[in-house]
Image (spheres, helix red, strand yellow):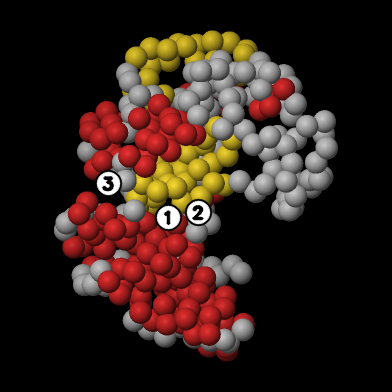
């Protein structure tokens, strides 16, 4: 299979383009961007001419049908559901932006229908559909069972829209599919009250906690131990391990990525297929893990020794320290054709 090392992401609710968690991704990437807003879909296609970025103007749900769609003042918050204007999500920080400007009729379909009709092989789901994320994921039931490795979705702990399904239901659904929660993209602050919060510069990180936690992104991964049964073909299994590790690395869990790769190298038989070691996906992980594990070189103690040992067990080569580190990193970057940004 010529494209088994190609990573495919299906993005439900792709307004503004490729999600930051996939920028940059140095492997070969196919990004299926679903956007129901015709104007935004056209803009995405025009501003993202890359061959790996494909726009599908369509609304996704857990069933096919015709539904009302609420276009809000802030188009990025438009939804099939009616906004709860008394919720923390709209009342305090976004007054007026959640008002419905007009209602249109849309035709919905499921992810499973699109995948079956187009014979797509999808590795990851990213879902942000303003209140209907759970239903969209339900509509990917067969696709998930066929081999989805990770899901990143906006989730709500308190309602922002009326009749919205909350985090607990989505978590139970995915755990029942063999997934585990990797992390919540939550930094300790929610929707503040009375304007009393310490974040005057939105570009700076916030160390304090405040406000009400209404929503954030949640990230789930398939349990690594299940990959061998899901992908009995050896090359497909190796590709899945690399993809899962890459997903973890790009979702604030580089240590989990290293653990997945190390476990496969020491207990799963390692890389037995020449095509795997020659793939751009392998070179991408080799580069990413070198930069991640190389951070411990500045204090050459037992942790640095462990990091070097992990790298050598996974990739079969020594990770340079001292003055040898950056030449090694730069050689890997040149092989991938990317710039080294530290």
Label 3 sits on residue: 147
Task: Specify the farthest residue to the bottom.
Answer: 323
Q: CA distance from mark 3 to mark 2?
A: 19 Å
Q: Is residue 180 above or below residue 106?
A: below
Badges 1 and 3: C-beta atoms under 8 Å apart?
no
Give the secondary structure at mark 1: helix
Badges 3 and 2: C-beta atoms under 8 Å apart?
no
Q: Is residue 181 above or below residue 135?
A: below
Residue depicted at x 66% and y 18%? 85
Q: CA distance from mark 2 to mark 1?
A: 6 Å
Q: Is residue 286 above or below residue 254?
A: below
Task: Specify the farthest residue to the left.
Answer: 233
Q: Nearer the viewer, residue 196 or 235?
A: 196
Q: Which mark is residue 94?
A: none
Label 1 sits on residue: 247
Badges 2 and 1: C-beta atoms under 8 Å apart?
yes
The answer, for residue 67, to whether it is visible in the render is yes
């Amino acid at each position: 299979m010529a494209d088994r090392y190609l990573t495919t992401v299906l993005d439900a609710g792709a307004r503004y383009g490729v999600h930051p968690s996939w920028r940059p991704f140095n492997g070969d990437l196919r990004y299926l961007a679903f956007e129901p807003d015709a104007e935004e879909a056209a803009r995405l296609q025009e501003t993202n001419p890359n061959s790996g970025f494909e726009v599908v103007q369509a609304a996704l749900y857990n069933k096919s049908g015709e539904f009302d769609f609420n276009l809000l003042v802030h188009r990025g918050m438009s939804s099939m559901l009616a906004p709860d204007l008394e919720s923390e999500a709209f009342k305090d920080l976004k007054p007026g932006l959640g008002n419905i400007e007009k209602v249109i009729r849309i035709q919905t379909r499921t992810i499973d229908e699109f995948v079956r009709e187009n014979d797509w092989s999808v590795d990851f789901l990213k879902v942000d559909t303003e209140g209907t994320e759970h239903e969209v994921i339900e509509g990917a039931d067969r696709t998930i069972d066929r081999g989805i490795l990770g899901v990143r979705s906006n989730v709500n702990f308190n309602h922002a829209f009326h009749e919205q399904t909350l985090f607990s239901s989505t978590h139970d659904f995915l755990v029942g599919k063999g997934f585990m929660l990797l992390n919540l993209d939550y930094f300790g602050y929610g929707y503040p009250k009375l304007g009393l919060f310490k974040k005057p510069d939105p570009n700076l990180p916030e160390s304090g906690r405040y406000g009400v936690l209404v929503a954030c992104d949640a990230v789930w991964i398939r349990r690594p131990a299940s990959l061998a049964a899901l992908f009995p073909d050896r090359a497909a299994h190796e590709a899945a391990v690399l993809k899962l590790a890459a997903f973890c690395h790009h979702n604030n869990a580089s240590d989990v990525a290293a653990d997945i790769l190390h476990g496969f190298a020491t207990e799963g038989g390692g890389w037995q297929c020449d095509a795997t070691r020659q793939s751009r996906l392998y070179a991408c992980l080799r580069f990413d893990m070198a930069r991640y594990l190389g951070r411990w070189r500045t204090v050459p103690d037992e942790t640095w020794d462990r990091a070097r040992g992990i790298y050598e067990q996974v990739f079969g080569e020594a990770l340079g320290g001292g003055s040898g580190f950056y030449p090694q990193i730069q050689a890997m970057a040149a092989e991938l054709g990317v710039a080294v940004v530290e």
